[in-house]
Structures are given as structure tokens and as C-alpha cells.
């Protein structure tokens, strides 16, 4: 019997999952050579993978910063789904309009799809309009379009007061606002422009699971004169006065505002009944939702890890292993360990790595490696490897 796996969302989590399970499907289809791998031993074409996404292509979160700060052009960081070459994955370019987790049927603009196993990897939607004044008076840099527009704003900027700020919690990639402040400093000072940068963050420390990483970031802020305002959010902007209003009522004048917009589950998830208190609850070890045969991975969940691609990828690998075990009628023993390695840009080609582990019920721990120029190359290899694995093609990053 063929197991129909339908993966909703081709971001970090969906691409990883579809690649692993689709690799099995391709290897076990009639005519596949035995060189395709022993994992397919004993199976026929027993799994069919359908991957659905509405976007034109995939963009790494960190590539948004590369474009913003002039290190890459938009076209160099867009990985078009039309280029996907995994023969075991059927990619459908469509908007998902309804999800019924009880029947595992989804409705899309390309028609309905029925699944035996459904994986929700739809990420977090971003809502800049939720912050009064942000669209009119500032730049959000978390959507692809917003980051690319922020690149134009930065290119035209003649220097002055820059406020980098988070507007609500939770938010993806907690190090990204700190990286943005550091890269903005490099960008402005290397152009000889006046530079007065303030970072507003809801967290008490830049990288809460890693005291060493937090100290290194705070030291870098101090060396560069970056003003760090912890445990606060920006609630609104007054575009006429060019002032950001903080959660404690304080006001910050700015010439350029770079904001992290509000995050929420995509409306199709909210309407499906899968979300509780805003996000999809899952078993932290298996990533299963409360609906049998329905999994969720990545930013769309409330699994307890930060919303970041490396965690979405790790969760997807666990779900893929469990799906393949079920297809082979083996016990699914693989469990999620909450580990992820995040890169941290300091500017001037210095990159650090934070190796973090989140285990339910225990405080997270994170070791700092670097920063160093060698880790900048390591980060490039991270991106390159994934594009090779997911899209089956090489990706050469522009020299920074
Ligand atoms: C500036 C910035 C820097 C970052 N840096 C890093 C980093 O260095 N390391 C890291 O690990 N993470 C980083 N991240 C975070 C990372 O990008 C996300 O956490 C990660 O992409 C989440 O993966 P996901 O699979 O859960 O969702 P996503 O990758 O967001 O994928 C969700 C997919 O679902 C699709 N979708 C949504 N709704 C629908 C619908 N109704 N119909 C069809 N398709 C739909 C979307 O088009 C999207 O392709 C960064 C993020 C930002 C913004």
C-alpha cells in the first residue's frame, strides 16, 4: 500500500522532510538502482510525497540580512521551487486554503489533497500592520519583501539614528536583531556615515541560553557604542514625529527604523483548529499533534525551541525518520533532542556559532564557538549544503 505524505510548506522544515522521505520514495520506486541506498531494502514504491507551497521559492532567513546590507542581490538568494529536482517529491505551487486535521484533507488553489500522513510546516506569518505606524514610518526586515525594501532604504540612508527593534513576542531567530544592529554599524561606519544605533529587545540578554554568547554580543555593542535596551518592545511608531514608542511609554527618536513585525500562525492554520493559544502544540519528542497521523514542525509549533530554521530542520528529520519507520513497519524510535547550531554575525566577516540544546523541563544550554573569520566560511557551507541537498544543485554565494 502506498502511504501518501502531504507536506504543507516548503520552508526549512518542509524542504528537509520532503527531501528525506522523497529520497526514500525515489530510491524505492520501480527501476531505481540498488545504489540508491540500503534504506529502501524490501520496500516497493510505498511512499508518495507531495510538497505544497504558495511562494515562488525559498530564501534563507540569513540571506535577508545579506541583501539588506548589500552583500547579495535578491536574485542570488532566491531558490526557485521550479528548480527542485528530487524525483521522489511532487511539488505543487499553490495556496493552501483549508486543512481538516481529522480527515487529513487539505484544500488548495490547485485542488484538494488527501493524506495518510500530514505534516504542517507552514511557519509563522508576519503582520507588520499590527504595529501602528510601522508600515508608514519604518521598515520591517523579516518578510522577504520587507528585507529587500530595507536594502533600498539603507542604500539611500545618509546616516543618523537607527533603531532596530522587536515589536512583539514570540519572534523568529532571536539573534537576528542583534546581528542587524552589528551589521548596520559595519554598513554605516564603512561608508563614513554618522551612526547612532539603538537595539530594543524583549529579552534580558541577547542570547538567553548562552551566557558566553550574550557577553560576546554585549561586548561588541559596547565597543561599537550600540545602545542596548533590554526587556522592552516597540509598541508603535509616530511617523510624523519619527519617534518609536516603547512598551514602558518611553519615546525613541529615529531616522531609520528597522523592525521585527508581529508573528502569528498562518490564517489557514488558525482556522483549522490545530492551534492552541496561538501555535500548534505537539509532543516535544515525536512532533505529533493531537490528531493521529498529523505532525507539525518548525515555527508554526509551540514545541519549546526558538523559532529558527535549524530547529525546524531537526524536527523535520525526526518526523521523516518516524514516517519511514512506519512505512517499513518498524518501530519509530527516533526522538527529538532539541539541539540546534545557530550562526551569529558580528560584522567585518566575524561569525560565531552557538550550539544550543533545549530539553523540556530543563534550562537550555548553549556553548559559544568563535567569533572568527573561519566560521564565516562554515556558515556559507551550511547554506550551500542545504541547497545541494534540497534542490540538487550548487549555490555559490557572492564574496562579501
Ligand atoms: C532576518 C532573519 C534571519 C534569520 N536567520 C536565521 C539563521 O541564521 N538560522 C536559522 O536557523 N534561522 C534563521 N531565521 C529563522 C528561519 O528563517 C525560520 O525560523 C525558518 O525558516 C522556519 O522554518 P519553517 O519551516 O518552520 O517555516 P518557513 O521556512 O517560514 O516556511 C513556511 C513555508 O510555508 C509557506 N506557506 C505559509 N502559508 C501558506 C499557505 N497558506 N499556502 C501555501 N504555502 C504557505 C510559506 O510560503 C513558506 O515557504 C532567520 C529569520 C529571519 C527573518
Image (cartoon, rainbow, N blue to C red):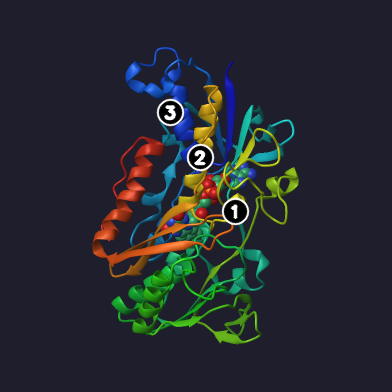
Question: At 40% across and 69% down in the image, what residue appears?
Answer: 213
Which residue is situated farthest in the top direction here? 31
Label 1 secondary element: loop
> Of residues 108 and 18, which is closer to you in this image?
18
Q: Is residue 387 above or below residue 34?
A: below
Q: What residue is pinned by disc 1?
A: 124
Residue 35 at x, y = what percent? Answer: 32, 20
How many angstroms separate mark 1 from mark 2 (CA)? Answer: 20 Å
The quarter in which the N terminus is drawn is: top right
- Residue 218 appears left or right of 118: left
Question: At 59% across and 58% down in the image, what residue appears?
Answer: 361
| Residue 348 showing in the rendered view | yes
Question: At 47% across and 29% down in the image, what residue appears?
Answer: 22
The quarter in which the C terminus is drawn is: bottom left
User: Looking at the rendered structure, which numbered label has been put on residue 318?
Assistant: 2
Question: Which is more foreground, mark 1 or mark 2?
Answer: 2
Q: Is residue 243 above or below residue 367?
A: below
First of labels 3, 1 by sequence position: 3
Amino acid at each position: 500500500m502506498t502511504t501518501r505524505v502531504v507536506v504543507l510548506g516548503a520552508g526549512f522544515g518542509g524542504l528537509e522532510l520532503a527531501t528525506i522521505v522523497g529520497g526514500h520514495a525515489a530510491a524505492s520506486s520501480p527501476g531505481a538502482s540498488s545504489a540508491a541506498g540500503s534504506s529502501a531494502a524490501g520496500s516497493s514504491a510505498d511512499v508518495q510525497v507531495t510538497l505544497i507551497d504558495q511562494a515562488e521559492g525559498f530564501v534563507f532567513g540569513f540571506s535577508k540580512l545579506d541583501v539588506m546590507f548589500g552583500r547579495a542581490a535578491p536574485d542570488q538568494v532566491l531558490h526557485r521551487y521550479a528548480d527542485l529536482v528530487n524525483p521522489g517529491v511532487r511539488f505543487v505551487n499553490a495556496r493552501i486554503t483549508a486543512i481538516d486535521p481529522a480527515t487529513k484533507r487539505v484544500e488548495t488553489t490547485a485542488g484538494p489533497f488527501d493524506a495518510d500522513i500530514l505534516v504542517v510546516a507552514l511557519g509563522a506569518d508576519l503582520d507588520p500592520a499590527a504595529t501602528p505606524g510601522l508600515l508608514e514610518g519604518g521598515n520591517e526586515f523579516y518578510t522577504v519583501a520587507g528585507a529587500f525594501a530595507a536594502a533600498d532604504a539603507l542604500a539611500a540612508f545618509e546616516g543618523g539614528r537607527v533603531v532596530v527593534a522587536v515589536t512583539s513576542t514570540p519572534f523568529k531567530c532571536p539573534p537576528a536583531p542583534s546581528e542587524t544592529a552589528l551589521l548596520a554599524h559595519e554598513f554605516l561606519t564603512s561608508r563614513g556615515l554618522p551612526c547612532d544605533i539603538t537595539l530594543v529587545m524583549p529579552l534580558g540578554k541577547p542570547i538567553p541560553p548562552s551566557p558566553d554568547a550574550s557577553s560576546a554580543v554585549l561586548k561588541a555593542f559596547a565597543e561599537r557604542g550600540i545602545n542596548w535596551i533590554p526587556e522592552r518592545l516597540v509598541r508603535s511608531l509616530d511617523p510624523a514625529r519619527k519617534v518609536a514608542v516603547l512598551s514602558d511609554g518611553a519615546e525613541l527618536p529615529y531616522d531609520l527604523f528597522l523592525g521585527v513585525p508581529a508573528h502569528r500562525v498562518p490564517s489557514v492554520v488558525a482556522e483549522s483548529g490545530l492551534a492552541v493559544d496561538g501555535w500548534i502544540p505537539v509532543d516535544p519528542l515525536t512532533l505529533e499533534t493531537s490528531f493521529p497521523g498529523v505532525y507539525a514542525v518548525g515555527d508554526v509549533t509551540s514545541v519549546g525551541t526558538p523559532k529558527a530554521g535549524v530547529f525546524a530542520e531537526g524536527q523535520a528529520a525526526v518526523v521523516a525518520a518516524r514516517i519511514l519507520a512506519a512505512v517499513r513497519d518498524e518501530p519509530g524510535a527516533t526522538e527529538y533532542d532539541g539541539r540546534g547550531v545557530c550562526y551569529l554575525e558580528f560584522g567585518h566577516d566575524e561569525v560565531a556559532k552557538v550550539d544550543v540544546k533545549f530539553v523540556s523541563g530543563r534550562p537550555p544550554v548553549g556553548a559559544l564557538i568563535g567569533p572568527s573569520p573561519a566560521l564565516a566560511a562554515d556558515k556559507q557551507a551550511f547554506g550551500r549544503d542545504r541547497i545541494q541537498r534540497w534542490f540538487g544543485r550548487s549555490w555559490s554565494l557572492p564574496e562579501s
